[in-house]
Amino acid sequence: MTMPDAHWGYGFPIGGVAAFDAEQGGVISAGGVGFDISCGIRCLRSNLKLQDAVTQFSDLADQLYKTIPAGVGEEGSIKMGQKVLDQVLNGGAQWAVKQGYGLAVDLEYIEEQGCVAGAVPENVSELAKKRQHGEMGTLGSGNHYLEVQVVDRIFDSEAAEAFGLDKGQIIVSIHCGSRGLGHQIGTDYLLLLAKAASRLGIRLPDRELACAPINSPEGQQYIGAMNAAINCALANRQILTHLTRETFKTVYPDIRLETLFDVSHNTCKTESHEINGQSRWLYVHRKGATRAFGPGHPKIPERYRTVGQPVIIGGSMGTGSYILAGCVENPAFASASHG
């Protein structure tokens, strides 16, 4: 199925959602996740109001440009050898917090508490790891951004109160993913899964839809690499959060920047969903689609559980972003658009 913002993409459309049951021969597809694995948005709320901050925006922009690299192939000051990078791929944002990048409380407001299980760094190629050597703590290019925003309108006061949002409040959105590592994993596994599909007699209408059964060796190999890339992206956004806080403090010494939520929109995750009245574990592909659990779901932080998961929908350059709340009756496997 497709989200309201769906458009052409490699393999699945961007804004595509598909769910498969491993016990019924379901497949995993690299094209159903995308090249920028775990691209997502981290939203930070502040204790600043627009009228108190706007006069120093120019200084803030200068400092952010100096601290946080952006652009194709741009590298940052954090360099990692393979041993440390493997720790990142296993530990995600939890690893970053242990290294002093951010706060332990941040983890409460990240999907899977900042680290997905099942990562297998050994399934990630040497080339993918080499590409990530200097890219931790960087934004990348394209539609990735760090944006200073203001809460302009509130439509649901109950949800806004739960999320800690007020009109005129300054917030920060960080939109990025797993950088070169995730892209290389996507490239590597499109080839591997295409070979698996051919070997198993899976007829593909388009090679970009290369896939393999979830329980096949190739399917499991991709899942291990994909989970490693998810952890890479979570660690990257955690490091960027730390750098953002440190930079804001140089301009606004009394600033507080708290993690509102961090949610990915290029993943495949195992989730329980009701199908024809029966609960089933499914592998839910979301490519350019955001997870959107409704009120009461156990994976939502307790603070938000009465109103639903924060659903962060990023705007394109010069357009507004939205923070929504997940609802219970969601026929799209608890998914929403991403931008």
Image: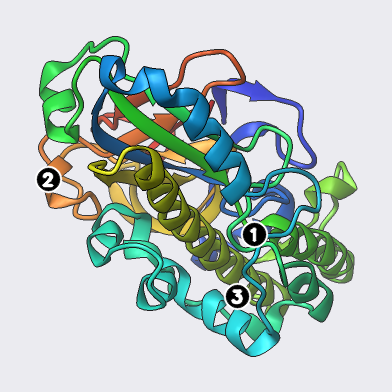
Compared across the picture, whether 271 is left or right of 9 comes to left
Residue shown at 60% from the left, 75% from the top: 224
Work out whether 52 lies above or below 278. Answer: above
Residue 318, image x, y percentages: 58, 14
Under tag 2, what secondary structure?
Answer: helix
| Quarter of the rendering containing residue 333 | top left
Name the residue carrying label 2.
303
Give, as a three-letter code, the residue at label 1.
Answer: Val
User: On screen, 70 above or below 233?
Assistant: above
Drawn side of residue 91 relative to residue 273, left or right: right
What residue would you read off at disc 3? 224
The quadrant holding residue 217 is bottom right
Q: Secondary structure at mark 1?
A: strand
User: Could you tell me the amino acid type at mark 3?
Assistant: Gly
Given this view, does label 2 or label 3 mark the residue nearer the observer?
2
Circle 3 Cα neighbour tier, 10 Å, few/some/many (<14 / 14–19 / ≥20): some
Considering the image in quadrants, where does the C terminus appear? top right
